[in-house]
Image: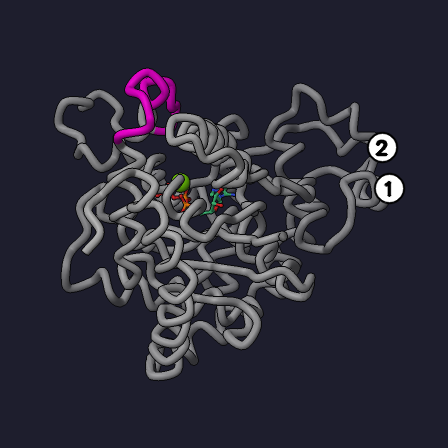
Amino acid sequence: PRRILSGIQASGALHLGNYLGALKRFTELQDQGAPLFIFVADMHAITVWQEPEKLAAQTREIAAAYLASGLDPAKAIIFPQSAVPAHAELAWIFNCVGRLGWLDRMTQFKEKSGKHKERSSVGLYTYPVLQAADILLYKATEVPVGEDQKQHLELTRDIAAKFNNDFGAPGYFPLPEPLIQGPATRVMSLRDGTAKMSKSDPSDLSRINLTDDADTIAAKVKKAKSDMDVLPDTIEGLEGRPEAKNLVAIYAALSDTTREAVLAEFGGQGFGAFKPKLAELAVSSMANVTAEMRRLMADPAEIDRALAAGAEKAREVAQPTIDEVKKIVGFWQG
Ligand code: ATP
Ligand code: MG
């Protein structure tokens, strides 16, 4: 049976990449009849320092974004990761299944640890193992994510396969597939068309935050790096023009159309004409989401109710699996 699961880290302001690559996708998946688990990854967030007095608010903010972008707690199971202890229990077992060599190949750790590898937390290194636990605890078969998570999904599959094999439990864990679809699976920085738009980029001009107001969005789009040429008539004409390619992809994703259709409309026009249209579209598409997020955040009772109910449902699904896994591993049973 299909089971869909994904999450976003509770580590700061959400941006257009998260919206197009994750949030918008989640809502599209809630009416497909398959159970949908969407969690707030607060345990992943603390792989880098988070102020304790802010973390719960950050968790509520991600939950608010889920609700505001259209996730319905009656259809999707929305919960904080840390409210289901089995994530940590399964992650430990998977730490003993995964191999150091596999983790050594993860490019995200290399990017995030930068020059200070030896001062990074151990958690930042084993983060993909916790991610495997997040997914396999619910025996998820599909994981909607952006391009940047593809490598981690492959690691999840390796861990599932090795667990099934080592413990003589063929097919126990499914090998989940990443769902990476649509025109904006990798939204790039507005300042550099070759780098991913990221929460952790020090330049605020590099990204459009979900909480930016209309003037800020317009200013950031206007300042976005582009080139002097007009937009081409075909996709091939975008090759070698990463910034143009990115802005066209963003426009297509925001207007639920294809890049071909965008070029059919704007081919032959320069960025002076295209950018104001893009800014207008970004403002109008995100305005409802941000307004609803602000409304929810003003009185978090509704958010907290959704999270508490989701956590209870998630624990109900997770418990039989973690009990069974402990038995498979050979832990003492009282
Ligand atoms: P950080 O820089 O702290 O890792 P992030 O911006 O990468 O933050 P995450 O919480 O790690 O955000 O990712 C949440 C979801 O958003 C994931 O599914 C991820 O693939 C997706 N995502 C992140 N950045 C982009 C992007 N630039 N384009 C498309 N999807 C993205
Ligand atoms: Mg990330």
Side of 53 where 291 appears, left or right: right
Whether residue 101 appears in magenta in the rendering, the answer is yes
Judge whether residue 59 can be spotted in this image. yes
Q: Name the residue under label 2.
A: 233
Side of 54 where 296 appears, left or right: right
Q: Name the residue under label 1.
A: 264
Judge whether residue 152 can be spotted in this image. no
Name the residue: 83% across, 44% down: 261
Q: In this view, does 199 lie above or below 63?
A: above
Q: Which of marks 1 and 2 is nearer the N terminus?
A: 2
Tell me the kind of residue under disc 2. Asp
Secondary element type, mark 1: helix
Q: Do the residues labelled 1 and 2 touch (CB within 8 Å)?
A: yes
Secondary element type, mark 2: loop
Ligand 2 image-quadrant field? top left
Magenta segment boundaries in residue numbering: 96-108
Q: Badge 1, how many Cα within 10 Å: few under 14, some, many 20+?
A: some
Name the residue: 26% across, 48% down: 88
Q: Is residue 172 above or below residue 23?
A: above
Where is residue 28 drawn, in percent x and y?
66, 60
